[in-house]
Amino acid sequence: MDRGLYIAASGMLAEQTRQDQIANDLANASTPGYKPDRSAQESFGRLMLENRSTGQQIGPLDLGTRIAAVRTDLTAAPLEQTGDSLDVAIDGEGFLAVQTPAGTRFTRNGQLVVDPQGRLATATGFPILDDKGQPIMVGNANDLVIGSDGTISRLGGKAIAKIGVVSLTRPVKQGDTLFAGVSGPRPAQTAVRQGFLEGSGVNPATAMVEMITSLRAFESAQKAIQTIDETLERGIQAGGA
């Protein structure tokens, strides 16, 4: 295969992956606690060119590009007041622990509900865990008060449980707002804010600019392939004349 075709094709594949990632970010621009991804590209390989007569090195020639890694930006987004007693936001570092069929996972999305079993759960139905790693039974959503330390109680009543807030190392994104990783103690200076949600970390304007840039790079690689194809075709025709 012509090396130019391979280089251009690898660039198109890398940009296609990047566009899928940006499109997913844009789709979650209003998802509470969503963390955007960033695609890092690198050269697939290099060929060192040299002068055959002298042996002197001329320089490297890249053989293509690829997505080296997709990294999640965990920067905290601004908190948005909702006034809903079941909405909670993590003010500072840390994650809420949730129970899923795949095991314990972690999230910054504090849009909570009370499920049919009377447990405090995420909007997708995963039970929220307390500081002892157990589901939190609240019965119903009436008069729930959640303190800044995560303690849940009834208005004027005794404490029911304490929301588990943990630190997380080696976080790996699983789905839109869930993470796997190694949990640790609650981070210092972290508070739970009732009636608030952390906004999405996606800046739609920035994401759109990135999408346009990626599309332009994709189109440039596509035009390069068309030019190479036309050049090869002319060469074949000239050789057969």
Image: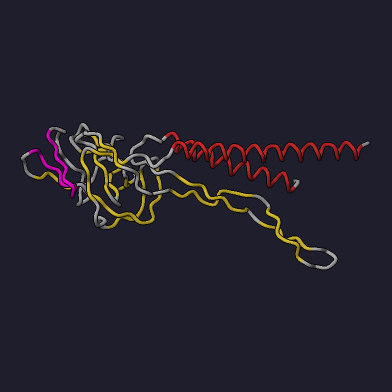
Q: Is residue 188 above or below residue 35?
A: below
Quarter-of-image position of residue 136: top left
Name the colour scheme. secondary structure
Image point (44%, 36%), residue name = 204
Q: Is residue 144 left or right of residue 41?
A: left
Which residue does the image show at 40% across and 50% down from the upper left? 172
Quadrant of the snapshot with the C terminus? top right
User: Measured from the top left, where is residue 220 in percent x and y?
Assistant: 66, 39
Side (left or right) of 44 relative to 227 = left
- Does 149 appear in magenta? yes
| Residue 236 in the image, given as x and y percentages of width and height | 86, 39
Image-based side of 1 in relation to 114, left or right? right
Residues 42 and 91: in front is 91
Give the magenta part as a residue range. Answer: 143-155
In the picture, measured across the screen, residue 135 lies left or right of residue 28, that is left
Front residue of 234/198: it is 198
- Judge whether residue 92 is colored magenta: no
Q: Residue shown at 20%/40% (left/top)?
A: 194
The residue closer to the viewer here, 151 or 191, is 191
**114 vs 220, nearest the viewer:** 220
